[in-house]
Amino acid sequence: MAKYNINLVRCKRTDPLYQDIRNRHYVANKGCHGQQLHYLIYLDDNLVGIISGASSVWAVKSRDEYFGLTKENKKVALPSIINNVVFRLETHLPNLATQVLSVWRKIISVDWEEHYKVKVHGFETFVVEEDFRKGALYKADNWDFLGQTYGNTKTHKGLSTPSERISTTPKLIFAKKIPKTSLSTSYTPTWNL
């Protein structure tokens, strides 16, 4: 198996290079919420894609069970799980995606702890399934398949308005724990990006 020279360069979500590639991702670019870190992916000296991590979604039953999240611990434990919200490669080579994902997990774990002051315990991602998209790169990186979302979510505009349930596209759920780590037991919000 070829070993690629992968370099991830941290950037802001508003970086024009990031935005150019982000706008071609199969999931519409509606910005990003919560804590977040974004990276440009370089293969040798060539920009080949983007990858991002952000705050985890609030409630997904199979993910909550997988990580041991409960009503009692969720507020302080959830920040130790990073959601791989965007991953787009524009160069396709055998095993490149899996190698990028592996490099990203290592780099973002360090950056997340340094930036947000919480040790990372694991990762989640949600994949819109198609004939050619079934989460194979996550399986190749030893992520666990947790099932599928129900195809609806709660949404609200502002914290003082009541939530509304809307239909969404069902997604495949994948997650991965970092060995010898645990969920955070204390957390102080840091919104300093």
Image (cartoon, rainbow, N blue to C red):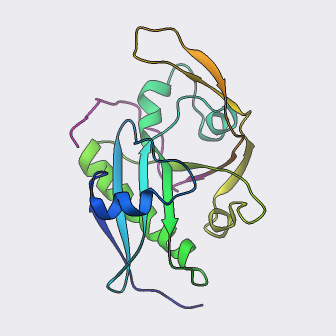
Name the residue located 52 percent from the left edge and 58 percent from the top edge. 25
Residue 187 is situated, as x and y percent measured from the top left of the image, at 33, 31
User: Is the stretch drawn in magenta largely helix, strand or loop?
Assistant: loop
Name the residue located 68 percent from the left edge and 60 percent from the top edge. 135
Is residue 94 placed above or below 115 in the rendered structure? Answer: below
Q: Quadrant of residue 5?
A: bottom left
Residue 168 is situated, as x and y percent measured from the top left of the image, at 67, 34
Left of 160 or right of it: where is 152?
A: right
Residue span colored magenta: 175-193
Residue 191: in magenta span: yes
Image quarter of the C terminus? top left
Is residue 145 placed above or below 56 in the rendered structure? Answer: below
Image quarter of the N terminus? bottom right
Q: Which is more toward the observer, 191 or 121?
A: 191
**Count of marks placed on residues:** 0
For the view shown, which residue lies furthest in the right direction?
Answer: 131
Residue 105: in magenta span: no
Q: Quadrant of residue 32?
A: top left
For the view shown, which residue lies furthest in the bottom direction?
Answer: 2
Q: Quadrant of residue 160?
A: top left
Name the residue located 48 percent from the left edge and 72 percent from the top edge. 100
Residue 17 is situated, as x and y percent measured from the top left of the image, at 31, 65
Left of 21 or right of it: where is 175?
A: right
Name the residue located 60 percent from the left edge and 35 percent from the top edge. 68
Residue 41 is situated, as x and y percent measured from the top left of the image, at 39, 71
